[in-house]
């Protein structure tokens, strides 16, 4: 890092990064130095969505769970499945075998404010298991939206 960059106050660096709005530039900023990384991640990970088991597994494989990781920057989380059918005949991807692996990651969303769960086909015990897997991450949620969720016994 140059002496000019090391002399800038963190508040000024944060203000500059807050003005960056495109993803590629934010990704580049996050790689410049540790001073830029946290603020860039704040914008890169503010909104996260999982629409398949593959995306959830990729997140779990690449992102380390914990309060210091990118999960802590997520404020808006959506979980959805894109099956055409709205009945339980289409296999749900979020079920008892995938939830335990994802639980440490779901609990890492400490900054979560909004969560949307939609187009899921689940059994009653799955809904409770999913909500329980979030743990204390749901305590600061101001809006939890369950749309087009089919719950059956």
Image (spheres, grey):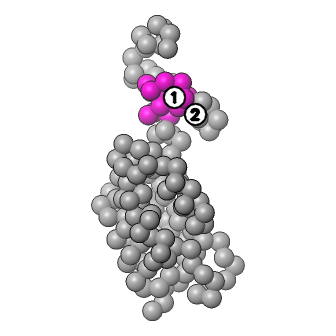
Callout 2 touching callout 1 (CB < 8 Å): yes
Q: Residue at x 56, y 74 (%)?
A: 93
Q: Quadrant of the C terminus?
A: bottom left
The residue at the point 47 percent across, 31 percent down is 37
Q: State the image coordinates of residue 11 (x, y, percent, origin top left).
A: 39, 23
Q: Position of residue 57 (x, y in %)?
A: 54, 60
Which residue is the extreme one toward the top? 3
Which residue corresponds to the image point at 45% horizontal and 77% vertical from the top-left? 96
The answer to which of marks 2 and 1 sits earlier in the sequence is 1
Dot 1: what SS?
A: helix
Which contiguous range is marked in magenta? 29-40
Q: Which residue, as the protein is rendered here, is positioned at the far right?
A: 84
Label placed on residue 26: 2
Residue 33 at least partly seen: yes
Identify whether 110 is placed above or below 50: above
Residue 132 magenta-highlighted: no
When asked about the image quadrant of residue 49, the answer is bottom right
Marks counted in the figure total 2
Q: Quadrant of residue 139?
A: bottom left
In the rendered image, residue 62, in percent from the top left (x then y), is placed at 52, 49
Name the residue: 44% across, 27% down.
34
**Tag shown at residue 17:** 1
């Amino acid at each position: 890092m140059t002496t000019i960059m090391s002399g800038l106050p963190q508040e000024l660096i944060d203000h500059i990064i807050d003005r960056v709005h495109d993803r590629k530039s934010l990704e580049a900023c996050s790689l410049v130095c540790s001073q830029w990384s946290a603020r860039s991640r704040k914008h890169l990970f503010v909104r996260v969505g999982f629409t398949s088991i593959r995306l959830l597994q990729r997140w779990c494989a690449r992102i380390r769970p914990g309060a210091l990781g990118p999960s802590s920057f997520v404020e808006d989380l959506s979980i959805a499945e894109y099956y055409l059918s709205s009945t339980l005949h289409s296999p749900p991807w979020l079920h008892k075998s995938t939830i335990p692996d994802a639980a440490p990651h779901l609990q890492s969303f400490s900054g979560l404010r909004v969560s949307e769960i939609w187009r899921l086909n689940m059994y009653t015990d799955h809904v409770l298991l999913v909500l329980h897997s979030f743990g204390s991450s749901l305590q600061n949620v101001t809006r939890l939206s369950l749309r087009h969720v089919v719950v059956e016994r």
